[in-house]
Image (cartoon, coloured by chain):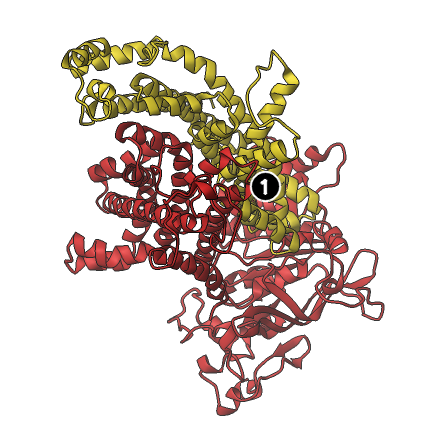
Amino acid sequence: MRRSLRRLVLPAGLLGLILLLALAAPLLPLADPVRQNIAGRLALPSANFWLGQDEYGRDVLSRILWGARVSLSVALAATIIAAVIGTLLGILGGYFRKFVELVTVRLAEVVLCFPPMLLALLVVTLLGPGAGTLVVSLGILFAPAFACLAYAETLSARALDYVTAQQALGAGPGRILLRTLLPNIAPPLIVQFSLTVASAMVLESGLSFLGLGVVPPSPSWGLMIRGARATMEQAPLLLFWPCLALAGTVLVLNLFCDRLRDALDPRAGGGGPAGFLRRAAALPGPALRKDATPGLLRIRGLTLEITGPRGPVAVVRDVGFSVAPGKTLALVGESGSGKTLTGLAVMGLLPGAVRVASGEILYTSRDGATRDLLRLPEAELRALRGRDLSMVFQDPSSSLNPLLRIGSQVAEALPRAPGRMARVVELFRQVGLPDPEGRARAWPHALSGGQRQRVMIAAAIANHPRLLLADEPTTALDVTVQAQILELLAGLKRSEQGMGMVFVTHNLAVVAQIADRVAVMYAGEVVEEGPVAEVFTAPRHPYTAALIAATPEGEAERLSAIPGAVPQAWAMPAGCRFAPRCSEARPACAQTAPPLQSIGPGRATRCLRWKELA
Amino acid sequence: MLAFAARRLAVSLALVWVVATLVFLVIHMIPGDPAELLLAQGGVAPDPALVADLRERLGLDQPLWTQYATYMGGLLQGDFGLSLQDEHAVADEIALRLPRTLELVATAGLLSVLIGLPAGVLAGLRAGQLTDRILSGIAALALSIPVFVIGTLAVLLLAQKLRLVSAGGYVPFATDPLRHIGLLLMPAGTIAFGLAAVVLRVTRGAVLEVLEREHVRAARARGLPAGAIIRRHVLRNSLTPVVTVVALHLGALLGGTVLVEFVFNWPGLSGYLVRSVEARDYPEVMGIVLVVSAIFVLLNFLVDMLYAVIDPRVRQG
């Protein structure tokens, strides 16, 4: 059973118990809830009256249980009315739009303009107090919320393919609305239903408390609290019981709603605390590595895990490559191959759900010391970010805070000193932004996608980093702009002396243009590494060969696609991960997972048959 | 910005007009003659002469559109008519009581933001940890206790058992400022108890959502310290949903202080409304509903302005 469902058991059980007690009130051996007994006025709990007697000597326990019937039936009846009317209006408005929408949804919105308690009082004025009035007024009160919710859900559902398909098949609107749309928009409506029951109970008891709801002598929790108020100094227990019953029931209902929402929407919740408040390193152990030979960046045996339904799942396994100063390494692979996660691991910016299982990321800083970034405490790693290590992300439009001016965001990367803004303008000029002074004062939404990416690059190079990670920096941009950004990055390689770059991409044409070396990733593993020219002319892994064959290039006669899809992280083949899609696979490939083996100076492959295929 | 404000203001004024018309129609369209309803005592049919007299006094004998014109004309001059019970000008009574309710609502709102916002940010940043569980647990509990229960229990505990404060009442600020504030804090604190929990939950959710956004990750990549990330990139971006929810609740409170005013004997607008409802005093009910709805609309207008201050994108849209 899923965890979210397990968590639903307790509130659901309690809720069931409350409903059962309310339903069973006539069957239980209870005293008459309205029979008065002046001799037993304000009596304390006794064997006959477990919770004591009230100001008229009536049995409190009996009144609580009978009161539950009144409160719950008023709340449920009102909620059912509100749900039926509201959902109907919302669905009709959302499905037919135009005039129907005007008279249904817009009307509901006008009703929402009134404060709820005020509206309830208005209805009570017109109809007079009583349980019937309560049901009507609460029904009117809560219907608009259902209407707006059903309307919004219908709008998003009616555009879906299966609804369009039904229309094309000639199904009438009644059939589509009831059989297709309603079941699909049901989950949020169910949550809204239980929320509304709780709100209706609170409002009902409030109105009864004011003397404008349930009419005495019918027992109702609100009325009981009203009655106990007069004598609360002598008999505080009398006040306590109905308060406990009311607050307890509402608490159970609210808890039920929260858990129900989690169960219906598995994406919600989870997460964990913010990553930047973490203090410890990703892995234990000393970070400083005196024995290591210096080099800009060397990754070895990097394995990243997420927690799946059946234990940990490796999303990146045994990844290794190195980057020399002034050189560019391209990290290539299909979506979901683990390229981006590898880049984020270098920066220490992995999302909370991803855990470093093992490996090392050695980085030699300006002072010549070599440190393992995976074992570096967050505070020291933070000091490297933006100064030694920089990253440019895939989508420039979401990488900028929409509420802060551009210049002020780029200035964050620079040390606090006079002339900071002048430096920002200078950076903007360097990355080729038109009107750099004006751009510094502009808001992010005033810039085009390409300009925003130039801003992100300006922030990344502000402190002359030694390593720049570019995570698909052109994917989200127009084709013409892509070329300009690539040109800018290629230019930076020349102007920023000694800056190494890791360029994450799925585009082989870009690799040839910008990179010195290439590491090809497949299903979380590096399958081949080597100098770009060598790998492209003589690939030593069938996946690399297939990727090259699948790339449109000049006058190629025909493109070949790779059959099948990347396996899911929790269903990896036991042997070579590419074997199920590989045209060269032999039975041996499905049995043993091949290691990444060196096949010459600076070249490596993860294929058992590389010699035969060469 | 100015054009944006003018456009929103026009929409708000139109809404007030719609509400005024709606209130007028609801009162006049329901079956049954208000004059007859008013004079009917215990199911005994009233004297037709008396009914006719009252109908004339209320202007009910005139055609609907004439009544509507008179009503709207009166509204434009700030005239809400006379109370049926004591022939007081409804506008005067509203002018006396409205500031007291507004003071109560504003104090409650301020208290709940002062408590709920920092607690919600803390719970969001420490999501899943002990701090968050304790804070969220308290919030869930506070949300489940109806406001009149909290108020009544507060009176029992703080006023009657511990004798720390008086059970309720009202003293004008000019007469005794300290006592005025003391008497204000009990009902305001009672409202803030539940409202702070709402603010906490919304803030926590908003912070959690913003933390996942890419611009926060980008700010971390620039090497910003945790404090600066929270201040510059998380807090302000989390504010929009908080503003929406607080405004919505403050608006709902304009009519919803009824219970608290009743518990603490606070002579605000809501108590007046309950009295009018009980007496079926139509001019009073109409006047109060209209004023409260108008303030509600005004509040929504102010919220839109606040969005524009928070988010530069709104100013253009």
> Which residue sits furthest front?
A39
Q: Amino acid at mark 1?
A: Gly
In which quarter of the view is residue A472 placed? bottom right
- Residue B44 lies, with reference to residue A253, above or below; the image says above
Residue A428 shows up from this direction: no
Task: State the hue of chain A.
Answer: red
- Taking depth in this image into account, of A361 and B153 the one nearest to the observer is B153
Residue B8 in the image: x percent, y percent?
40, 25
Give the secondary structure at mark 1. Answer: loop
Q: Is residue A492 left or right of residue A156?
A: right
Which image quarter holds the C terminus of chain A? bottom right
Which chain's colour is yellow? Answer: B
Total labels drawn: 1
**Tag 1, which chain?**
A
Residue B234 shows up from this direction: yes
- Taking depth in this image into account, of A520 and B166 the one nearest to the observer is B166
Q: Is residue A465 left or right of residue B147?
A: right
In which quarter of the view is residue A608 placed? bottom right
> Which residue sits furthest bottom?
A587
- Taking depth in this image into account, of A6 and A171 the one nearest to the observer is A6
Residue at 46% across / 59% down in the picture? A14
Residue B28 in the image: x percent, y percent?
21, 22
Q: Residues within 10 Å of mark 1 (few under 14, many from 20)?
A: some
Residue B125 in the image: x percent, y percent?
63, 49
Residue that badge 1 annotates: A432
- Residue B105 lies, with reference to residue A468, above or below; the image says above
Residue B50 in the image: x percent, y percent?
19, 12
